[in-house]
Image (cartoon, helix red, strand yellow):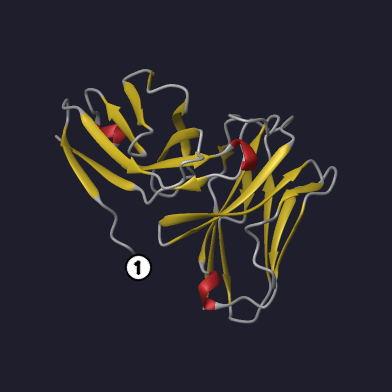
Amino acid sequence: GEEVAQTPKHLVRGEGQKAKLYCAPIKGHSYVFWYQQVLKNEFKFLISFQNENVFDETGMPKERFSAKCLPNSPCSLEIQATKLEDSAVYFCASSPRGEYMDIQYFGAGTRLSVL
Amino acid sequence: GESVGLHLPTLSVQEGDNSIINCAYSNSASDYFIWYKQESGKGPQFIIDIRSNMDKRQGQRVTVLLNKTVKHLSLQIAATQPGDSAVYFCAESTTDSWGKFQFGAGTQVVVTP
């Protein structure tokens, strides 16, 4: 597609439940990035992929968070045993080549509310 | 309704006036910078970028200025329009960690008629 598609738009989970978010990058883009935005501010880089390979995972919390990009499937970000502080908007972005100065195109985000 | 959150710095601008949004960055190794615009309920949208070997770059109605000496970036919007109302973020990256952008705090721009 011509834009990054994220689903669902809004996800509500009780504390301790699992949350799974999906991202379909722009067709032809090789790189996918996940960011977390808390309180309409503070973007935090989580992880990036080059096709199905993890490229940079230095922002990923060590526990509970995992992500995948499998061939012919949307990328996913999964949070096991959600906590209240996981409430945020999670953005996915893609770029054509991941090269220095490549623009990242963002999706509309998934709002995760942990109650 | 929404929970109480962080109050963003706000810039109120009259329609037709010029806007200047400022951003201080901390990493002296940062060598690539982007300005993004985020409208309510949407993801960040690319506006303009600049490399560290430049101090000024112009686009359509927008100009980005970079002062590496004081680690300061600004975005100027000419003849501000109601559609410019949004939150504006600067983002920085380095060649060593390209793709991993560090975002600034964001500035809310409100355009008044």
Q: Which corner quadrant holds the C terminus of chain B?
A: top left
- Determine which quarter of the picture holds residue B84: top left
B47 in relation to B88, above or below: above
**Where residue A25 sits in the image (x, y, percent)?**
68, 40
Image-based side of A21 in relation to B72, left or right: right
Disc 1: CA contacts within 10 A as few (<14), some (14-19) or many (>=20): few
Residue sitting at the far front: B69
Q: Position of residue A33 (x, y in %)?
A: 64, 46
Looking at the rendered structure, the kind of residue marked 1 is: Gly
Coordinates of residue B75 in the picture (x, y in percent): 32, 31
Q: Which residue is mark 1?
A: B1
Judged from this view, the residue extending furthest toward the right is A71
Quadrant where the N terminus of chain B lies?
Answer: bottom left
Residue B25, by quadrant, is: top left
Residue drawn at point x = 39 percent, y = 48 percent: B40
State the SS at label 1.
loop
How many dots with numbers?
1
Q: What's the residue at 34%, 66% (across, down)?
A: B5
Q: Nearer the viewer, residue A19 or A103?
A: A103
Q: Position of residue A94 (x, y in %)?
A: 65, 38
As displayed, is residue B71 above or below residue A37? above
Read off the chain for label 1. Answer: B
On the rendered structure, is B81 left or right of A1?
left
Q: Is residue B110 above or below residue B9?
A: above
Answer left or right for B12 relative to B57. Answer: left
Q: Residue at x 85, y 44 (%)?
A: A71
Q: Nearer the viewer, residue A72 or A46?
A: A46
